[in-house]
Amino acid sequence: MAAAAAAAALAAADPPPAMPQAAGAGGPAARRDFYWLRSFLAGGVFSALRAVPQKEGYLGLYKGNGAMMIRIFPYGAIQFMAFEHYKTLITTKLGVSGHVHRLMAGSMAGMTAVICTYPLDMVRVRLAFQVKGEHTYTGIIHAFKTIYAKEGGFLGFYRGLMPTILGMAPYAGVSFFTFGTLKSVGLSHAPTLLGRPSSDNPNVLVLKTHINLLCGGVAGAIAQTISYPFDVTRRRMQLGTALPEFEKCLTMWETMKYVYGHHGIRRGLYRGLSLNYIRCVPSQAVAFTTYELMKQFFHLN
């Protein structure tokens, strides 16, 4: 759903007309105080969720989901495995510990996972962006063959890799850093309220499941906000010739300059952010919680 809706969010739209302020006690002030938030949520989320089913039916919300499902397992596995490896390496070889090593290890783990699974992400975006009745690709295999044949061979699958890496480094780094920091601070200051003994090692405290979900969701929201302009740039570069402004967006800098120049910050570099909150917050919450539970299941504590 997120892939198709995010692609729909790339389409240009006229700015909404100014809303008249309601009269009455507290009316104008209250509307001014929350107008940006209401516009942000209504414009970024519901317009995309309404537009896709109207044009493509409700199955259109799941375009590209096959490639996403194939990608998500190796991506998550590589990222969490690499995080633990890099964290140990940074601590033992560089002598860096505390909160900083989480930020460094998370950034490196995110970049590793991206490089390993990027071609599947490219195919996912291409399949999600297709308009009904104008399909360039008939499926995952056909998309791979077409991109390889028409867009420079193997290198064609890595178009937009640089903004992805630049965006993933802070996203994964901040995500792991925030979750790890919330976890350690919480268990240090309120171990009884927030924690419980690990099922595989009673001497180790772990967060309760609902606290894990909360910390994971907060980590995802903060990380997404910081890295989102790079995500917008990545999607535009991945779409390549599917966009009319293709020749103006050949490099990361050209793409960011074009988006900012034509659409600004809110409707350009941060367009669709609210929809990505709906995707990334529960996604990160479940990912971190599942990882913590699996660590206990495999006796890693």
Image: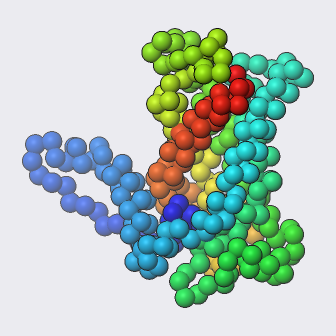
Q: Nearer the viewer, residue 12 or 98?
A: 98
Quarter containing the C terminus: top right
> What is the x, y in percent for residue 61?
49, 68
> What is the x, y in percent for residue 47?
39, 66
Above or below — where is 154 with respect to 206?
below
Residue drawn 65% across and 31% down? Answer: 297
Classify residue 130 by image quadrant: bottom right
Q: Nearer the viewer, residue 26 or 183?
A: 183
Above or below — where is 112 with respect to 211?
below
Residue drawn 77% across and 80% down? Answer: 146
Residue drawn 80% across and 78% down? Answer: 145
**Can you name the residue that lies furthest to the right here?**
93
> What is the x, y in percent for residue 226?
59, 43
Residue 34 visible, this orientation: yes
Please state if 286 lies on the left or on the right of 84 as rendered: left
Residue drawn 82% across and 71% down? Answer: 156
Q: How is the image coloured?
A: rainbow
> What is the x, y in percent for residue 55?
44, 80
